[in-house]
Amino acid sequence: MIVEYVQAALERARYELIDDAEPYYGEVSELAGVWASGRTLEECRRRLAEVLDGWIVVRLGRGLPIPPLGNHTISKPESLEVNV
C-alpha cells in the first residue's frame, strides 16, 4: 500500500532545472510541501522519495489526511497489534 502510493507520487513528480548550486528541483504538486533538489536528476529523485516517506510518517503520526493519488490511498490504521 505505501510502496504503491510512493511510486504513484513519484510518477506524478515534475522536475525542472533552476539556477542554483543544486540545479535540479522536483515536486509533487498534489502533495503540499513535497519537494526536493539535487546536484543531479537522480539525486533529486532520491531525495524526493525520502521527503515523501517522511511526509507520510508525519501526516500519519499527526492524524492528518493523506490525499489519494488515483487509486492509491493511505489511511491511519485503527490499531496496531504486536504479538510477542
Image (cartoon, rainbow, N blue to C red):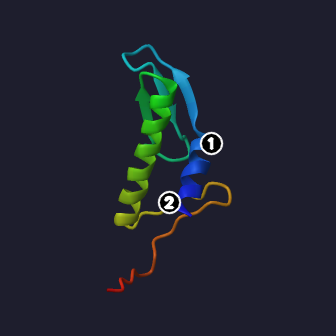
Which label number is shown at residue 50?
A: none
Mark 2 element type: loop
Kindly indicate whether the residue at mark 1 contacts the one at mark 2 (C-beta within 8 angstroms).
no
Given residues 42 and 48, the one toward you in this image is 42
Q: Position of residue 54 (x, y in %)?
A: 38, 51
Q: Depth-wise, is mark 2 or mark 1 nearer the camera? A: 1
Q: Quadrant of the N terminus?
A: bottom right
User: For mark 2, does the 10 Å Cα neighbourhood hold few (<14), some (14 to 19), or many (20 or more) residues?
Assistant: some
Name the amino acid type tagged 2: Ile
Mark 1 element type: helix
Residue drawn at point x = 45 percent, y = 71 percent: 76
In the image, farthest residue toward the right: 71
Q: Position of residue 28 (x, y in %)?
A: 54, 41
Residue drawn at point x = 35 percent, y = 83 percent: 82
- In this figure, what is the number of numbered marks? 2
User: For mark 1, does the 10 Å Cα neighbourhood hold few (<14), some (14 to 19), or many (20 or more) residues?
Assistant: few
Kindly identify which residue carries mark 2. 66
Q: Position of residue 16 (x, y in %)?
A: 54, 23
Q: Quadrant of the C terminus?
A: bottom left
Whether residue 54 is situated above or below residue 65 in the rendered picture:
above
Name the amino acid type tagged 1: Glu
In this picture, residue 25 sits left or right of residue 62: right
In the image, farthest residue toward the top: 19
Mark 2 vs mark 1, CA separation in Å: 17 Å
The numbered mark, 2 or 1, whose residue comes first in the sequence reads: 1
In the image, farthest residue toward the front: 84
Q: Position of residue 21 (x, y in %)?
A: 36, 16
Whether residue 46 is situated above or below residue 16 in the rendered picture:
below
Kindly identify which residue carries mark 1. 11
Residue drawn at point x = 39 percent, y = 16 percent: 20
The quadrant where residue 68 appears: bottom right
Residue drawn at point x = 43 percent, y = 56 percent: 56
